[in-house]
Image (cartoon, rainbow, N blue to C red):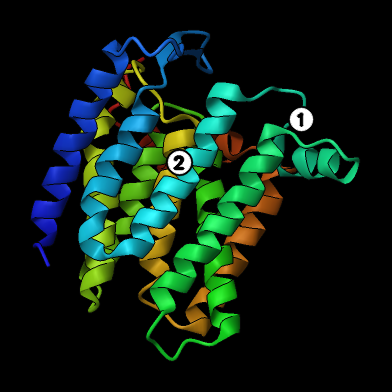
Amino acid sequence: MLPTVVVGAAGALLGATTARLAARSPLGVSMDRTNHAGLRVSLAEGPAYVVGAAAVAVFAGPAPVIATLGAGGFGAVDDFAGDSRSKGLKGHLGALAHGEVTTGALKILGIGATGLLAAWVADRGTDASLVSTLVGGAVIAGAANLGNLFDLRPGRALKVVVLTGAPMLLARDATTRTAAAAAIGTALGLLPDDLAGRTMLGDTGANAAGALVGTAYVGSVGLPGRLAALSVLAGLTLASEKVSFTKVIESTPVLRELDRLGRRG
C-alpha cells in the first residue's frame, strides 16, 4: 500500500488539475452558481473532488471508492438536475411521504444505499455483524450529509474534512490511513480556490468528501465506535433543522477565527 503522504499529494494534484480542466470543458452543463454572497462561482470543484479522491482512494480498497463515487454521483443529480421546491432533510422526506420524489429525496436514498454497500464491502471477510454493517452504512451516509451541511461558506467544508480526517492518519489500520489521506490531500489541493471564492464543492463534492471520511472511520472501529459516531451525526443533523451552523460558528470566537482563516473578504 502506498505511503499516506504519496496518496495525499496525488489527491491534491489530481483534484486541482481536474478542477481546472472541468471549468474549461464544453460539456453543455453550466458550472456557475451563486454563492451566499451573491457572487458567481464554479461548481467544477465538486466533480474534481470526486475524481481526485476516488482515483487515489483505490489504494485503500473498493469501499472508499464506492462511497465517494456513490455520494458524489447522487450529489451531482441534485446539483445539475435538481430543483429548490423542498429544502433540508425534513423537506425532502416530507415531500416523499406525500408521493413527490424530489432530486433531494433521490439523493438521500441513493447515498443511503451506496453507504450501506460501502460498509458491506468494508466488512467482508471480517467478523462484523449485520447490525454493525447496517450502522456503518448509516454512518457513511450521515457523514456525507453532514459534509453538505457545512458547505455554506468558502473553505468551511474542506476544513472540516481535514480536521476530522487528520486523526485517522494515525490509525493502526493502513486502509483507514490511506482513505483519510485521499480525503485530506484532495481537500487541500482544492482549498485555495475554494477559500478565494472562485469555486465551491456543491452537493457533488461535499457529499463525496463526507462519505469518504465516514468510510475511513468505519473501517477503523467496531460496533461501539460506529454507534457513537451515528449518535453524533444524528444529533447534528437534527440540530441543523432548528439551528444555523453559521450562527453558532460566528458566535463562538475560536470557531469563527478558524472558519475565516485564509478566506478572502
Q: Which mark is residue 128?
A: none
> Callout 1, which amino acid?
Ser
- Front residue of 253 and 101: 101
Dot 1 falls on a residue whose secondary structure is loop
Q: Identify the residue under disc 2.
A: 72
Q: Position of residue 129 (x, y in %)?
A: 54, 87
> Callout 2, which amino acid?
Gly
Q: Residue at x 58, y 73 (%)?
A: 135
Q: Residue at x 59, y 58 (%)?
A: 113
Sequence-first disc among 1 and 2: 2
Circle 1 residues within 10 Å: few <14, some 14–19, many ≥20: some
Q: Identify the residue under disc 1.
A: 86
- Front residue of 220 and 265: 220
Give the image quarter of residue 205: top left
Tag 1 and tag 2, C-beta contact below 8 Å: no
Give the image quarter of residue 47: top left
Quarter of the image where the C terminus is located: top left
Circle 2 residues within 10 Å: few <14, some 14–19, many ≥20: many
Q: Residue at x 87, y 46 (%)?
A: 97
Q: Position of residue 23 (x, y in %)?
A: 30, 15
Dot 2 falls on a residue whose secondary structure is helix
State whether residue 253 appears in this view.
Answer: no
Q: Judge whether 135 appears above or below 222 on screen.
A: above
